[in-house]
Image: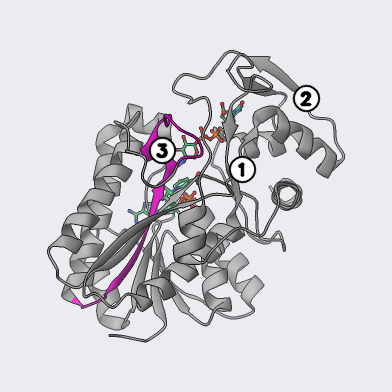
Amino acid sequence: MSNSKLVLVTGGAGYIGSHTVISLVNAGYKPVILDNYSNSDPQVIAGIQDILQQPVTHYQGDCRDWDLVNSIFSKHEFEGVIHFAASKAVGESVEQPLAYYGNNLDSLMMLLKAMNQFNVPKLVFSSSCTVYGQPDQLPVTENTDRKPAASPYGNTKKICEDIIIDVVKSNTGLKAVALRYFNPIGAHPSAKIGELPLGTPSNLIPFVTQTAAGIRKVLTVFGDDYNTPDGTCIRDYIHVMDLSDAHVRSLSYLDEQQANSYYDFFNLGTGKGTSVMEVIKTFEEVAGVSLNYQVGPRRSGDIEQIFASVDKAKEVLHWETTKTMEQALGDTWKWQQIISKTS
Ligand code: NAD
Ligand code: WQD
């Protein structure tokens, strides 16, 4: 088995990918980034290199471009691939299903083809808690059945998991884990990289920080009549640095598996549910600002509450979160203040 420490990170200029590149280097890996910058800025590479104080190999291009992928795999002897690259906006996926199926499925299949051809054994795949829909029991464990997807985006994650399972079953030497992220938030504590949403954010945390920074006038809380203690929706918000560490741990976990082909999947969350109102109140305390918000109607397609059971990740992967919601919101606020100044 290759032990080159070289890891291809697709989507490595994106939000979670860029933070994972930092964790990989800190753990002794040599990441190689492939990103087409469809949802990121090439400047992110400068931020990564600034934090690491060393250059990071990066290619601009599309995972679906076989000639490029083939040339990258020919040049570097990878021991694994962490596949972040995907289109991820739920609402947009409803409007442009073919673009989402096209990008998310074809990118994965192209990489699996290259991994097979070049005998690259390990794959870490970015999946999502969206595969559970509104689970019948909370916290949601990995034994919970996946629900029919509520959006084409969610369906791509389910189908991608299934494609990986089928390839593992074909016993051609693929060892893979799918990581089902809950709600990633936060930024690198240096505030040199963070989430860079293009246009008006649809996710809660960037909307909160942009409102506090005066970029948005008012944050709308989407419904306060849910069957939760304060009436607002509950999610499991996980610091992006904790999430990044789980990818590094997943690579060594795959090394420990003796089988020729292997598949497993893990929830990555904190195990704690936090309501929208709790997020707002914690942010106000951490940032020392008063947030302009109003309660509005429910957002169509929102589930009432979801949070992870993290027992499997703790017991099997030997990974758990170390950062608090306060740290995550503090780091995001620091990052927002930097990007507000420079844009
Ligand atoms: P992101 O959009 O910030 O990063 C994805 C990166 O992939 C971007 O830099 C984009 O330019 C690149 N990319 C997209 N298609 C590409 C292609 N065909 N070829 C090369 N590069 C391509 O997203 P993120 O938040 O960092 O998410 C990373 C992964 O995690 C995605 O697969 C996403 O679906 C999944 N995920 C994200 C969340 C979340 O809330 N952020 C939650 C669950 C799962
Ligand atoms: C969180 C909560 C909103 C904005 C999405 C994807 C999911 C996964 C993670 C990729 C909800 C409320 C939000 C606002 C609000 N991504 N909210 N006002 O919907 O849990 O998950 O990202 O796999 O697939 O659907 O995240 O940040 O959009 O919302 O009140 O302006 O904040 O109703 O309860 P969500 P979110």
What is the CA distance from the residue labelled 2 to the residue labelled 3?
29 Å
Quarter of the image for the N terminus: give it: bottom left
- The residue sitting at 36% across, 78% down in the picture is 255
Query: Residue 219 falls in which quadrant of the image?
Result: top right
Question: Percent from the top left, x then y, of residue 290?
Answer: 84, 30
**Which SS class for mark 1?**
loop
Which residue in the structure is indicated by mark 2?
292
The residue type indicated by label 1 comes to Lys
Which residue in the structure is indicated by mark 1?
272
Question: Under 8 Å from ligand 2: the CB of mark 3?
Answer: yes
Question: Mark 1 or mark 3, which is nearer to you?
Answer: 1
Which residue in the structure is indicated by mark 3?
130
- The residue sitting at 31% across, 64% down in the picture is 176
**Which SS class for mark 2?**
loop
What is the CA distance from the residue labelled 1 to the residue labelled 3?
17 Å
Residue density around tag 3, few if under 14, some if 14–19, many if 20 or more, within 10 Å = many
